[in-house]
Amino acid sequence: MKKLFVTVILTAATTVLLAQKTRLNAYGMYVFDDKFDSYYDPYNYYNGTLKGSFQYGLGAEFMVSPHNCVELMWQHQSTTAPTEYIGGVASTLKHTNFDVNIDYALIGGDRHFAPPHSKAEGYGGIFLGMAFLGAKNPDFNTHNTASKFAWGFRLGTNIWANEKFGIKLQAQLLSISQGAGGGLYFGTGGVGAGVSSYSSVYQFQLGAGLTFKLGH
C-alpha cells in the first residue's frame, strides 16, 4: 500500500512540476509533545509521550487560480516515545523509550489572500493523506511499521522578498487516526494482546520555510 501511494504521489507531483504557476516549498517545523494512552484494565494498558522534535519536508504547490492552490507534500520526523505499559496479569510493568519515525504524504489545498501591493500573502487550508510509521523496541530489538490515514490543517504567511522567492511562517496541526497502539507499531509485545483500542496522534507544529515560484 505504501509503494502504491508513493507512486501515485510522485506521478501527480511530476504532472504538477511540468505545469506553469508552480511553487516549490521547503519546510522546517518544530513538533511539540503529544501524549497517547489506552486503558483496558489494571493489567492491560499503556501510556506514553511522542516527544517533540524537528520535522522537515518538501512540497509542490500548483496555483489553480490567483487565490487557490493544490499542494503535494511530504514531511518527515524522527523522535522517541517514552512509554509505560503492561500486558496480562503475569506481566511486569515496563518503561521503554521507543525510536519512532513518521513520514507524512499529503495532498490538499490552500486559500491565499493578500492586500493589494503587499509583500505578505496569508494562506490557510486542509490536507489529507497517509502517515507511514516505524518504531523500534529496544527491549526486544524489534521494529514494527504501520500505515494510517492522516489529516491536517494550517495557517501561515508568505513574505515575498522578490517576485520569485519568499519566506514561509506557519502553524500546523497534523493528526494520525488510531496512530498509537499496543501491538500496532510500538511493538510492546504482550500488551498488544490485551489492549485492542488505539490512541490517535495530534501533532501541533510551528515553523518556517522557503518558497520558490517556477511559473509566470
Image: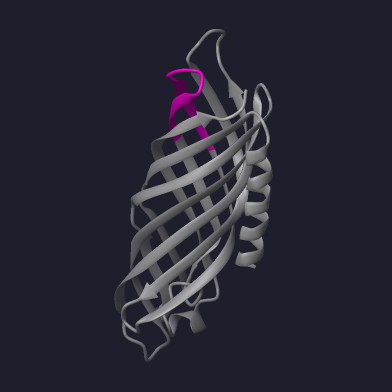
Task: Locate the C terminus and report the quarter of the image it occupies.
Answer: top right
Secondary structure that dominates the magenta span:
strand
Q: Which residues are magenta?
A: 154-170
Rendered residue at 39%/38% (across/down): 206
Q: Residue furthest bottom?
A: 90
Image coordinates of residue 164 in percent, x first then y, are 50, 23
Q: Residue furthest top?
A: 117
Front one among 88 and 147: 147
Asked if the magenta segment contains residue 164, the reply would be yes
Rendered residue at 37%/91% (across/down): 90
User: Measured along the vertical axis of the image, is residue 66 above or below residue 98?
Assistant: above
* Residue 136 visible in the shown view: yes
Image coordinates of residue 120 in percent, x first then y, are 48, 17
Rendered residue at 33%/56% (across/down): 51
Image coordinates of residue 192 in percent, x first then y, are 48, 80
Front one among 170 and 60: 60
Front one among 16 and 116: 16
Rendered residue at 45%/39% (across/down): 26
Q: How many marks?
A: 0
Front one among 139 and 49: 139
Asked if the magenta segment contains residue 95, the reply would be no
Task: Locate the N terminus and report the quarter of the image it occupies.
Answer: bottom right
Instruction: Give the side of residue 123 with respect to residue 169, left or right.
Output: right
User: Measured along the vertical axis of the image, is residue 110 above or below residue 183?
Assistant: above
* Residue 40 visible in the shown view: no
Image coordinates of residue 111 in percent, x first then y, are 62, 28
Instruction: Give the side of residue 142 with respect to residue 199, left or right.
Output: left
